[in-house]
Image (cartoon, rainbow, N blue to C red):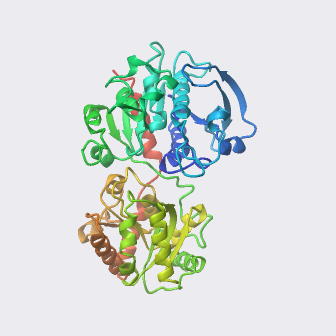
């Protein structure tokens, strides 16, 4: 099964969220499941630097509209995954992240940048490809590649089947109809079954309408996005495509996220040596300038500081959380208001609250290992990865029952604990009082060491790897060719 995986980011080189993690890890697992995978991604500065010896494959001439010519380069990741690097310096050789300038605003030519990525993906997945290698399946990810299944319609013979994966429906690639001509699209494309969307155009809508199969990153999220509450205006289309929509839970990389082998930790541990987890708590307290207390739980947060993640709710209960008593360590960045709120909380409680604005991979691992309880009260969460990191590290997650959080975290009860299923704490309501009440309940449970360790062992016994999800994706690919 030959698969062209098309993405706008790929970890560890270019990453803004879960999409980058998936693009970095899933192709590796698919190779292990017997697929021949090649990943098409723009040749951003970070990828140019990471693969300076990438070999030139072919020049791609102008493809209509304002889409410029570009070049393809070949490289290989350390895990053996083949990369197809789309080189167009005028569009991709820029500072900032893939979508935003350093000042924080969207690049104005994002439609052209990701229109080119989509157009090239469609060409490589068709009989018009200049490469000898032709995919059976074109697998597209999020709005940045949403035009690819639509462009693929222009190739009537010998085109690959297509799969469109939604990582977060909130990001849809909506633009003015003025960009149609730039993207080599015309009046015949401007209709409800084309790219038109509420008077503008939408990359994602085009992909959801024209891909052969649709996936999203958890079973619960697949159901939620068909409702008015979570459908973000796309619920009607998704309901119509329901027979072709499947939720496949993301995985995590057990080589990178394993407390027994994690090089970032002060002390390795596993589910049979949970006492050593305390050494990581002590080391984290020292590193972050917290009082070295063993008499209260330590709550951890590693996240974008946004409304979606529910972290305004945590900021609102900061005083009550510390008075439980408890400590709090935060790593993340996001809205300026939330960053300021957490800084103010740390200033009010020196030695009890530590906040680092930004991101640090090693510190993220140490928080996962050193915290007792991981706070993730998201209002919506397509999949979530940090709750799975937390489960693997025996750091019990406190979540809301949405998306992938609902699919991975089982609320504590005596019955669920006895059955070996309970592995965390679930708060149903998205308000400060409920979050604080659940946090107080979890903090109280922390003092009951036999039950707490039973919860930890349940959490660490789960399989959160990519092995199962990769096989489900392979089965989905094969279903495209069944009678």
Which quarter of the picture shows residue 245? top left
Residue 139: percent from the left, percent from the top?
47, 32
Residue 390: percent from the left, percent from the top?
45, 64
Q: Is residue 245 positioned above or below 288 on the image?
A: above
Residue at 27% across, 39% down: 235
Residue 146: percent from the left, percent from the top?
44, 32
Q: Is residue 147 positioned above or below 18 on the image?
A: above
Q: Is residue 420 positioned above or below 202 on the image?
A: below
Does 446 sit left or right of 36 as displayed?
A: left
Outermost residue on the front side: it is 178
| Quarter that holds the C terminus | top left
Tell me if I can see residue 387 in this picture. yes
Residue at 41% across, 58% down: 462
Q: Work out whether residue 384 or residue 196 is closer to the camera in this orientation and state it.
A: 196
Question: How many labels, in total?
Answer: 0
Tell me if I can see residue 35 in this picture. no
Residue 29: percent from the left, percent from the top?
52, 43
Does 138 sit left or right of 209 as displayed?
A: right
Which quarter of the picture shows residue 374? bottom left
Which quarter of the picture shows residue 49? top right
Residue at 30% across, 58% down: 401
Does 103 sit left or right of 408 as displayed?
A: right
Outermost residue on the top side: it is 157
Q: Is residue 199 positioned above or below 442 on the image?
A: above
Does 385 sit left or right of 79 as displayed?
A: left
């Amino acid at each position: 099964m030959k698969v062209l995986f098309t993405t706008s980011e790929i970890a560890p080189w270019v990453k803004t969220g879960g999409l980058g993690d998936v693009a970095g890890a899933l192709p590796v697992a698919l190779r292990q499941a017997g697929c021949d995978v090649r990943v098409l991604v723009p040749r951003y500065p970070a990828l140019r630097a990471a693969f300076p010896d990438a070999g030139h494959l072919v020049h791609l001439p102008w493809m209509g509209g304002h889409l410029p010519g570009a070049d393809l380069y070949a490289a290989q990741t350390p895990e053996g995954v083949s990369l197809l690097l789309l080189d167009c310096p005028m569009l991709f050789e820029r500072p900032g992240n893939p979508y935003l300038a350093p000042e924080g605003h969207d690049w104005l030519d994002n439609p052209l940048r990701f229109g080119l990525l989509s157009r090239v993906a469609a060409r490589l997945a068709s009989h018009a490809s200049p490469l000898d290698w032709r995919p059976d399946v074109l697998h597209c990810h999020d709005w940045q590649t949403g035009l690819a299944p639509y462009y693929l319609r222009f190739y009537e013979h010998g085109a690959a089947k297509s799969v469109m994966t939604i990582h977060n429906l909130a990001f849809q690639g909506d633009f003015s109809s003025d960009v149609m001509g730039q993207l080599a699209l015309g009046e015949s494309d401007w209709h409800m079954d084309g790219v038109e969307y509420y008077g503008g155009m939408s990359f994602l809508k085009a992909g959801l309408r024209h891909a052969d199969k649709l996936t999203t990153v958890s079973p619960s999220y697949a159901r939620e996005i068909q409702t008015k509450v979570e459908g973000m205006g796309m619920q009607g289309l998704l309901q119509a495509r329901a027979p072709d929509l499947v939720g496949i839970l993301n995985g995590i990389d057990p080589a990178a996220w394993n407390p027994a082998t994690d090089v970032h930790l002060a002390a390795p541990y596993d589910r049979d040596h949970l006492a050593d987890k305390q050494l990581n708590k002590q080391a984290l307290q020292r590193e972050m300038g917290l009082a070295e207390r063993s008499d209260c739980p330590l709550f951890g947060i590693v996240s974008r500081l946004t409304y979606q993640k529910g972290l305004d709710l945590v900021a609102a209960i900061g005083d009550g959380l510390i008075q439980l008593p408890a400590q709090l360590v935060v790593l993340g960045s996001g809205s300026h208001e939330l960053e300021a709120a957490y800084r103010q909380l740390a200033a009010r409680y020196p030695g009890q609250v530590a906040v680092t604005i930004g991101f640090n991979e090693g510190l993220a691992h140490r928080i996962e290992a050193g915290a007792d309880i991981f706070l993730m009260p998201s209002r919506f969460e397509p999949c979530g990865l940090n709750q799975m990191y937390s489960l693997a590290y025996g750091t019990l997650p406190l979540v809301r029952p949405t998306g992938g959080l609902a699919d991975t975290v089982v609320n504590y009860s005596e019955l669920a604990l006895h059955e070996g299923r309970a592995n965390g704490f679930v708060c149903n309501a998205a308000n400060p009082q409920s979050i604080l009440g659940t946090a107080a309940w979890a903090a109280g449970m922390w003092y009951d060491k036999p039950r707490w360790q039973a919860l930890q062992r349940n959490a660490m016994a789960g399989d959160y790897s990519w092995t199962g999800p990769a096989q489900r994706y392979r089965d989905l690919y094969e279903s495209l060719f069944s009678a």
